[in-house]
Image (cartoon, rainbow, N blue to C red):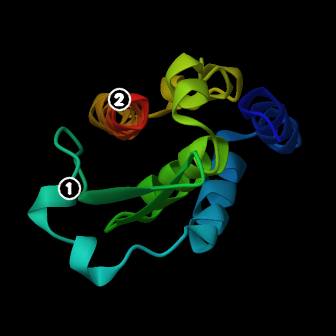
């Protein structure tokens, strides 16, 4: 599936909830689907700077695509990173770099996060795109 197709799927899933409390519950539920990060990557080297909670993200490049794993000590944040991984993992670096993550605004996520969580969301996206950029540059050499 393409990034846009996955985003449409997420928007559709969230459209079934009228209340933000239900959306938060769904985010918590999604957190259990997070691809487990190798414990050796739960170090300061992999931590996302700018997040209120602790978030670790790692990426690996296989067969021309980027695959992410992550963890967080906060359950809502874990659900958010699960969505980001669902959208970007298994995609090419160029597709990740070109992606507009419209689902974030379309499901109302950004406007329903505290300012510190919203900054953390942007920091997670930035780090995931930095990984994609590094893989893209390495792949072109």
Q: Which residue is drawn at 30% across and 34% down?
A: 123
Quarter the C terminus occupies: top left
Would you call the spot at circle 1 few (<14 residues within 10 Å), some (14-19), or many (20 or more)? Answer: many
Q: Which residue is drawn at 55% across and 25% down?
A: 94
Image spot of residue 78 (x, y percent) = 46, 60
Q: Is residue 138 left or right of residue 65?
A: left
Q: Which mark is residue 74?
A: none
C-alpha gap between disc 1 and disc 2: 22 Å
Q: Mark 1 points at which residue?
A: 47
Q: In this view, does 58 lie to the left or right of 103?
A: left
Image spot of residue 124 (x, y percent) = 36, 40
Q: Number of marks in the image?
A: 2
The residue at the far left in this view is: 44
Give the mark toward the camera: 1 or 2.
2
Counting residues from the start of the chain, the first of labels 1 and 2 encountered is 1
Would you call the spot at circle 2 few (<14 residues within 10 Å), some (14-19), or many (20 or more)? Answer: few
Q: In which quarter of the image is residue 9?
A: top right
Q: Do the residues labelled 1 and 2 touch (CB within 8 Å)?
A: no
Q: Quadrant of residue 45?
A: bottom left
Q: Is residue 103 left or right of residue 117?
A: right
Q: Nearer the viewer, residue 13 or 1?
A: 1
Image spot of residue 54 (x, y percent) = 23, 59
Q: Mark 2 points at which residue?
A: 137
Q: Is residue 52 left or right of residue 115?
A: left
Label 2: element kind: helix
Picture layout, residue 24 above or below residue 121: below
The residue at the far bottom in this view is: 39
Picture layout, residue 38 above or below residue 15: below
Image spot of residue 56 (x, y percent) = 29, 60
Label 1: element kind: loop
Q: Which of 49 and 3 is in front in this view?
A: 3
Q: Which residue is drawn at 68% across and 27% down?
A: 103
């Amino acid at each position: 599936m393409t990034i846009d197709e996955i985003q449409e799927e997420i928007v559709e899933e969230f459209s079934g909830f009228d209340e933000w409390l239900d959306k938060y519950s769904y985010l918590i539920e999604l957190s259990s689907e997070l691809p487990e990060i190798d414990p050796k990557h739960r170090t300061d080297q992999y931590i996302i700077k700018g997040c209120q909670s602790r978030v670790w993200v790692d990426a690996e490049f296989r067969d021309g695509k980027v695959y992410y794993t992550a963890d967080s000590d906060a359950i809502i944040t874990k659900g958010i990173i699960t969505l980001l991984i669902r959208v970007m993992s298994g995609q090419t670096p160029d597709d990740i770099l070109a992606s507009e993550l419209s689902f974030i605004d379309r499901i109302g996520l950004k406007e329903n996060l505290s300012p510190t969580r919203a900054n953390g969301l942007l920091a997670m996206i930035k780090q995931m795109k930095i990984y994609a950029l590094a893989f893209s540059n390495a792949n072109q050499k």
